[in-house]
Amino acid sequence: MSALIHNLTLNDPNKASSARRSKATIVHPNVKYCVGDKLIVQINMFDNLDNMKTYGGDFIKARIHTPKLQAAASGRVEDFNNGTYHIHFSLFWEGRVYISIVLLHSSEAVAALWRARNKDFGLVYFIGTFVDRGQQVKSECGFQLNSEKNICEYKNEEDHEAFYCYKPDTLRCGSLVYLQSFNRDVSFLNPSEKMLFNSDNIAVEIPKHHEYIDVQKCTNSSPSTLELCKIGIDSPIPSGFVLQNSWKPSFCRISNFTTQEQMYSCLSDKMIYFMGDSTVRQWLTYLVQTFKGLKMFDLHRVGLETLMVAIDQERNVKIQWKKHSHPIVASRLYMVKDDAYVHEQIDQLAGGSHYVIVICLGQHFRLFPIQVFIRRIINVHKALNRLFLRSPDTKVIIKTENTRDDSHDAERFSNFYGYIHNMIMRDVFRNLPVAVVDAWDMTIAYNTLDVHPPNHVVKSQIDMFLTYIC
């Protein structure tokens, strides 16, 4: 996937990149392909008028797959910024390997998304419920409000995080208990740009000269043994592949859990803190469903889940998930009375060898200007630095975003935003002793379209997580 973003103004939709008129060809095709070989596919991008594009920035999803083997892997996109792209694949398995290269968004659509995203906070608004002595008052909230009215500021000068509500006439600012969000009937895309996001222009396959290649195992020698996945090891792009519906990292090996009890022993005598969105909450629910000794603790909370706790007293295991605070985009009421940003949650923990922290941020930030996400990630980085100073043996894992359906409301939820988030997270956390569960790469390979992928995909993420903490 390309990270180039051009400052483009679309005057003629016919000059936008067209998947159907573009071409994909194998660079220097081989007579024979072997497991371990590299495969390069060249994309020549054309517009709707059959003109070769002269600049890059198209948002491309590339993967190879063998359905019979339930095998798949993503490809790395190299953008030459002249309408030509190279897609780099590693051939991890033998068999008939199909090539799939999809234009998710044209470079013109990417430019429109970037401009629209950073123009305003107005795609979503929040309604807060203030409660005091039996009285309830609802009031609008958000990251930006009209300052001419009386406003409640929920602000920390040190970390520059701020959220606001219009103050009810009769209630205290401290009586805010619930929030919920609603989409505004507004768009920051002009009519020509909106055409780029109709169903005919999103996630279109680029025609290929070769639909597939046949890959053979050309040597009898055993592959070299990779070291066990551990905290601090670099995660490359792409980071692995799927085989028989299970994830295989390309840079390290997952622990050989032959029994569920071996997996369960990883959790023993640990306090695990999942911090972030519902995609890491899914980890908690998966663990509770898988390991019967884990029991949910009833917190008697109202509305959308914002805090969940599971415990196993016999093995001395505590697992907690807590949402990451503003922004949470949800039409259901959710509690904010015990709210805390991720960096505040980290600062509240002593840390140590029995502590495991998993952080996942991104999905709810897609609807807001990028500076909201960048500020949050920097604050998390600072908090992790403080944590490692007091407790360097704390294990920290970064879970990247899952992909989701590209055809649903691209202006709010495009995977392009998630891709940018992942690049930022990788860059910001690069110098810290943390591990990465590359859910982004996994969900591209598995080709999942649900932000909450099926259990076999979650299991692959969990297997990586358990290997890191064992």
Image (cartoon, rainbow, N blue to C red):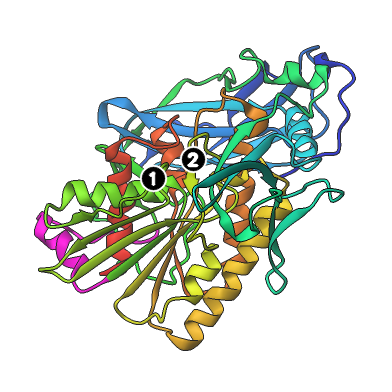
Instruction: Report whether 220 appears left or right of 72.
Output: left
Residue 121 disc label: none
- The residue carrying mark 2 is 333
Quarter that holds the C terminus: bottom left
The magenta segment: 251-270
**Secondary structure that dominates the magenta span:** loop
Q: Residues within 10 Å of mark 2 (few under 14, many from 20)?
A: some
Between residue 378 and residue 249, name the one nearer to us: 378
Instruction: Report whether 109 appears left or right of 104.
Output: right
Q: Residue at x 64, y 47 (%)?
A: 420
Disc 2 to disc 1, how far (Cα)? 8 Å
- The residue carrying mark 1 is 302
Above or below, 306 relative to 385: above
Q: The disc labelled 1 sits on which kind of residue?
A: Val
Disc 1, SS: loop
Write down the quadrant of residue 61 in the picture. Answer: top right
Q: Residue at x 65, y 54 (%)?
A: 373
Question: Where is residue 71 drawn, in percent x and y?
Answer: 32, 35
Above or below, 283 relative to 253: above
Quarter that holds the N terminus: top right
Above or below, 289 relative to 60: below
